Amino acid sequence: MKRRNNQLFPLVSALDTLLRTTEISDYAGALNGLQIENKGVVSRIVAAVDACEAVLLEAAKVPGTLLLVHHGLFWSGAQPIKGSLYRKLKAALDGDLSLYSSHLPLDLHPLLGNNVLLAKAIGLTGIKPALELKGQSVGVIGKIQPLKREKFSDLLSRSVGGRVHLSPGGPETITSVLVVSGGAGGEVARAADLEVDAFVTGEGPHWSFTSAEELGLNLFYAGHYATEVFGVKALAHWLSENTGLPWSFLDHPTGL
């Protein structure tokens, strides 16, 4: 990709290649890739976690914006174009905004993914793919210098910039960790099968807390949103470095 390339479709092609968008299996509602095209010229790059109305309205204020998100527009499947969906699409079209979404392809990317970047932020070493879902490894596993459970929780909290909730089912000293960003708490039994001391994810169902206790696993809920800011920032930075286009992060935390 040449520097200062501001044409939309070459940028989309570069993103698809980098993220292996067509090769990675995902949920149907993810609809990874370009979800909204604009007139064809990009003026800036904005990263955000969710393609929610507040984010789209703000991003569309500058014509030619390419908005990169982790959670796109179509998680609910086919739906009438009315209400919030109508307002989001109208804002995008009126503001000449393009939207690119990447869910699991961004989660599991070996350099720019949510999982590997969170793992590095908490100091894991020997990081390798782990926990198969939809025919691919969606998390990473690694080692850490022995750390007391409470100290590890503090470290994780600093890394995600927010509160961490813990189900203290495992050993008091942590040396091995599985990281799967987002809402992977329901995979607690499969995480325990990997024989790690701790499982770090964003959130999980109510029953995952007691399951972690019963399985002898420390389960850390670090926030769905908070564990998934890493990838979109890294992706926007990568695209900026390769195009000369400015980028920024639009923060709209859910607290979940």
Image (spheres, rainbow, N blue to C red):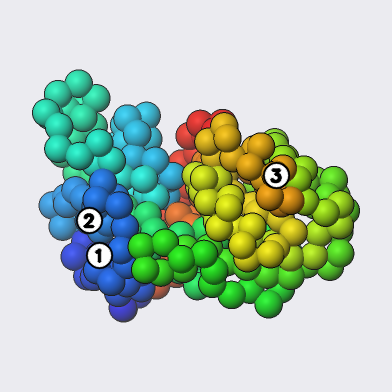
The reply to whether dot 2 and dot 1 touch (C-beta < 8 Å) is yes
Residue for badge 1: 12
Q: Position of residue 241 (x, y in %)?
A: 44, 69
User: Mark 1 or mark 3, which has the lower sequence index?
Assistant: 1
Q: Which quarter of the figure has residue 106?
A: bottom left
The label shown at residue 214 is 3
Q: Position of residue 123 (x, y in %)?
A: 74, 65
Q: Position of residue 192 (x, y in %)?
A: 64, 57
Q: Which quarter of the figure has residue 211?
A: top right
Q: Residue at horizontal 60%, vertical 58%?
A: 191
Up-down relation of residue 104 to residue 249 (above or below): below
Q: Position of residue 2 (x, y in %)?
A: 31, 78
Say which amino acid is labelled 1. Answer: Val
Q: Residue at horizontal 68%, vertical 77%?
A: 126
Up-down relation of residue 198 to residue 12 (above or below): above
Q: CA distance from mark 1 to mark 3?
A: 46 Å
Say which amino acid is labelled 2. Answer: Leu
Q: Looking at the image, which is closer to me, 55 or 70?
A: 70
Q: CA distance from mark 2 to mark 1?
A: 7 Å
User: Mark 2 or mark 1, which has the lower sequence index?
Assistant: 1
Q: Is residue 234 visible?
A: no
Q: CA distance from mark 3 to mark 2?
A: 43 Å
The reply to whether dot 1 and dot 3 touch (C-beta < 8 Å) is no
Residue for badge 2: 34
